[in-house]
Image: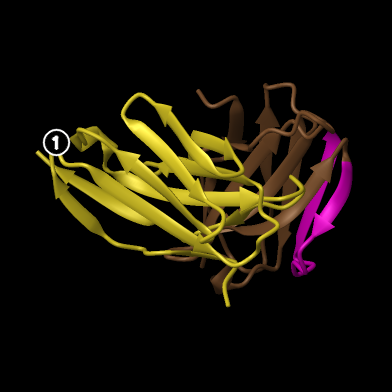
Amino acid sequence: QKEVEQDPGPLSVPEGAIVSLNCTYSNSAFQYFMWYRQYSRKGPELLMYTYSSGNKEDGRFTAQVDKSSKYISLFIRDSQPSDSATYLCAMTYNFNKFYFGSGTKLNVKP
Amino acid sequence: ETGVTQTPRHLVMGMTNKKSLKCEQHLGHNAMYWYKQSAKKPLELMFVYSLEERVENNSVPSRFSPECPNSSHLFLHLHTLQPEDSALYLCASSQAVAGSNQPQHFGDGTRLSIL
């Protein structure tokens, strides 16, 4: 069983839609959770960073962690074509090793 | 600008060549990482350096050899690579201090193609 599972997509939505991206994980020791956005030919860029359970909001982005279900989500409101990218979830418990999902490719159509 | 710079951005090499990838971070971080990214697969951690000492080596073949001369620079020396080593190689850095652990920041990677 993989440590982190993420649907690879692609996910295609119209501009203005609410996007929901998700990851599940198997290790209950994970405490820190991250979402990265990766544009084509670029490295991953940190979007959101949360500790333990709960919600965190930053502009159009909301990160949600449900440790009881081992499930994390990233919501994007009012999606824009510039949001088209691959989104990677990541998590860790000791900051020596980070565990990544395989990424979900998102396409926001104008 | 991400604060983590990787060179070269693209590299094509034959299986018998020797080359090196370079990473430099300008964020004042004390930990640096090498990852391999292949299509539709999770990032594979290769090496971790904390305070210039290697703390993690994930069973990487010896044809990959890392070097961390100081906390701002990281190299990946390559020799006798195989076609399956073609991938995007990403460098990352973070501030890993007890009580103040922070997530990683990535460079834009080196796209490596083995002929």
The quadrant where residue B95 appears: top right
Residue B95 lies, with reference to residue A19, above or below; the image says: above
Q: Nearer the viewer, residue A20 or A8?
A: A20
From this viewpoint, is residue A40 visible? no
Q: Single out the residue that lies furthest toward the front.
A: A68
Q: How many marks?
A: 1
Residue in the picture at 26% in, 46% down: A19
From this viewpoint, is residue A95 visible? yes
Q: Which residue is mark 1?
A: A16
Any magenta on residue B108?
Answer: no
Residue A23 lies, with reference to residue B59, above or below; the image says: above
Q: Position of residue B78 (x, y in %)?
A: 71, 57
User: In the figure, is residue B76 to the left or right of A17?
Assistant: right
Crowdedness near tag 1: few (<14), some (14–19) or many (≥20) residues, C-alpha within 10 Å: some
Q: Secondary structure at mark 1?
A: loop
Q: Main secondary structure of the magenta part?
A: strand
For the magenta stretch, what is the residue range? B53-70
Colour for chain B in the figure: brown
